[in-house]
Amino acid sequence: MTSKEYCGREYWIKENLRYTHRYFRTLKLAKIVNVMSRGKPCDLLDLGCGPETLSSLLNQNVSYFGIDIALHRAQKHLMEMDITRNPIHFHGNTFDFVVAAGLFEYMGNCSHEKYAEILTLLKPNGKFIVTYMNMDHCTKPSFPSWNNIVTIDEFKEGLSQHYHVLDFFPSYYSAKEGDLESELMRKLQLNFNLNIPLIGKRYGVNYIFICSPKDAVGNTSLGRYGRNFKNAQACSPCRPN
């Protein structure tokens, strides 16, 4: 069951408290950003930041900013905004990383408009890191408030109209839909960033996509992130008001 409606602040002010838990997807995103930043000062914008769980996992060289429809506290580095009703912006600032985790399942028909707006938020050679649930997983996941249901191939194709998809892979493999809870499996899969096509389609849970703007220099090769990751370890509104 899915919904064609957009969830408002009243829904998210309660729902986003679930994400104070450090889900494995969030741990892996933090690891990716920490490695890709290579210890250099950089700025990150977290779209749909909720209770800012990602911020506590980032290295000190990463300056954290967030946007959410339902903030629990007012802070200078945060902005409350319903991005389905407003163009995404952050006081005219641009960022080295824009992260959107568990967001586009709720974007309805806004996805392409939001992809274009995120482009304006990226610095030259900045990276857009986005997750999306694998709807073809063996458990056939569903959630009542999802309103943007596509396959992983369709999601990648949509991204590719705006970005070079440098790499994409499941955040983890599991026969279950829920979070990866086993500490052993978390350790084994934290640095495992590989898409195994047939296995991934059935057992890959949340997919992670590493993207760069199409006009960025030297960022056009699929799989570039995977190689860089290993090297680094070694060294207008879209709905009515």
Image (spheres, grey):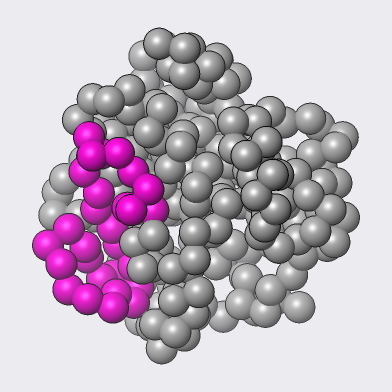
- Determine if the magenta segment contains residue 74: yes
Q: Quadrant of the N terminus?
A: bottom right
In the foreground, 66 or 106: 66
In the foreground, 64 or 102: 64
- Give the x, y percent position of residue 163: 48, 32
Please say if 233 is above or below 180: above
In the foreground, 101 or 229: 229
Identity of the residue furthest to the bottom in this view: 10
Image side of residue 142 versus residue 216, left or right:
right
Image side of residue 34 versus residue 210, left or right:
left
Q: Is residue 208 visible?
A: yes
| Residue at figure coordinates x 35%, y 73% from the top left | 69
Q: Quadrant of residue 119?
A: top left
Per the rendered image, the range of residues in magenta is 54-83
Q: Quadrant of the C terminus?
A: bottom left
Q: Quadrant of residue 79?
A: bottom left
| Residue at figure coordinates x 59%, y 62% from the top left | 105
Q: How many marks?
A: 0
| Residue at figure coordinates x 46%, y 37% from the top left | 31
